[in-house]
């Protein structure tokens, strides 16, 4: 598979999109599995106010930025004269360029998260070392977010709401 590194705008938009979805959509709830991984965000999505929620989401997204840079660069290390320097430069760019972002609707957020997930090929990092507990948790969170946002989108459609699936 061919991979590429997303722009700072892409990561920033996803980060802000997750925060907006949690804060502004009263009928969006994070999965129960987030209760221990992102306790502040989980509480916020269940109508309890918290100021630390954004910090947790930003920390999660920083880890995803880092994993993305590592995996893409390791996959294409044979094209680089100094992969360590490339990783350092690209990570610096993504971690310091956090002002630009695009407002995303939930469906756009879902597709942007799926694109990030698709580009991350963990096996390239695992060839070098094992994932840290934080990286493992971040990959889990990424996949759970994709699933929960997809569920949120589907359950808010007219077809779903008119479905007789609960009582066949």
Image (cartoon, rainbow, N blue to C red):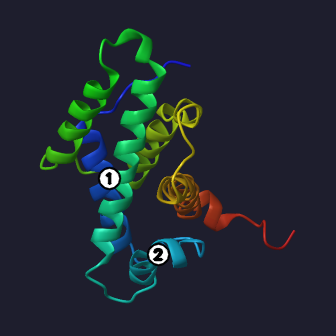
* Residue located at (78% from left, 65% from top): 165
Q: For mark 1, what is the residue?
A: 62
In percent of width and height, residue 142 lies at 50, 53
Is disc 2 placed on a helix, strand or loop? loop
Q: Is residue 59 above or below residue 63?
A: below
Q: CA distance from mark 2 to mark 1?
A: 27 Å
Q: Is residue 14 above or below residue 77?
A: below
Image-quadrant location for residue 127: top right
- In percent of the image, x 36 and y 65: which residue is there? 21
Q: Position of residue 162 (x, y in %)?
A: 66, 65
Residue 97 shown left or right of residue 139 in the figure? left
Dots 2, 1 in contact, CB < 8 A: no
Question: Which of the marked residues, 2 or 1, is nearer the chain's N terminus?
Answer: 2
Foreground tag (2 vs 1) = 1
- In this picture, is 152 found above or below 122? below
Left or right: where does residue 46 sit relative to residue 55? right
**Where does label 2 land, which residue?**
27
Residue shown at the point (41%, 38%) measured from the top left: 68
Q: Residue 143: x percent and y percent?
A: 56, 52
Residue 105 visible? The answer is no
Question: Could you tell me if residue 31 is visible in this image?
Answer: yes
* Residue 150 % position (x, y): 55, 54
> Badge 1 local density, few (<14 within 10 Å), some, or many (20+)?
some
């Amino acid at each position: 598979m061919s991979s590429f590194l997303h722009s700072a705008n892409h990561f920033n938009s996803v980060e802000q999109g997750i925060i907006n979805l949690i804060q502004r959509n009263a009928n969006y709830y994070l999965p129960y599995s987030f209760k221990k991984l992102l306790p502040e965000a989980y509480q916020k999505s269940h109508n309890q106010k918290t100021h630390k929620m954004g910090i947790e989401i930003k920390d999660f997204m920083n880890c995803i930025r880092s994993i993305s840079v590592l995996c893409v660069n390791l996959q294409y290390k044979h094209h680089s004269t100094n992969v360590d320097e490339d990783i350092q430069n690209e990570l610096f760019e993504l971690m310091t360029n956090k002002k630009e972002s695009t407002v995303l609707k939930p469906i756009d957020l879902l597709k942007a998260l799926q694109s990030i997930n698709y580009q991350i090929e963990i096996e390239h990092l695992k060839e070098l070392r094992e994932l840290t507990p934080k990286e493992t948790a971040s990959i889990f969170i990424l996949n759970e977010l994709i699933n929960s946002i997809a569920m949120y989108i589907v359950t808010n459609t007219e077809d779903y709401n008119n479905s007789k699936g609960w009582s066949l």
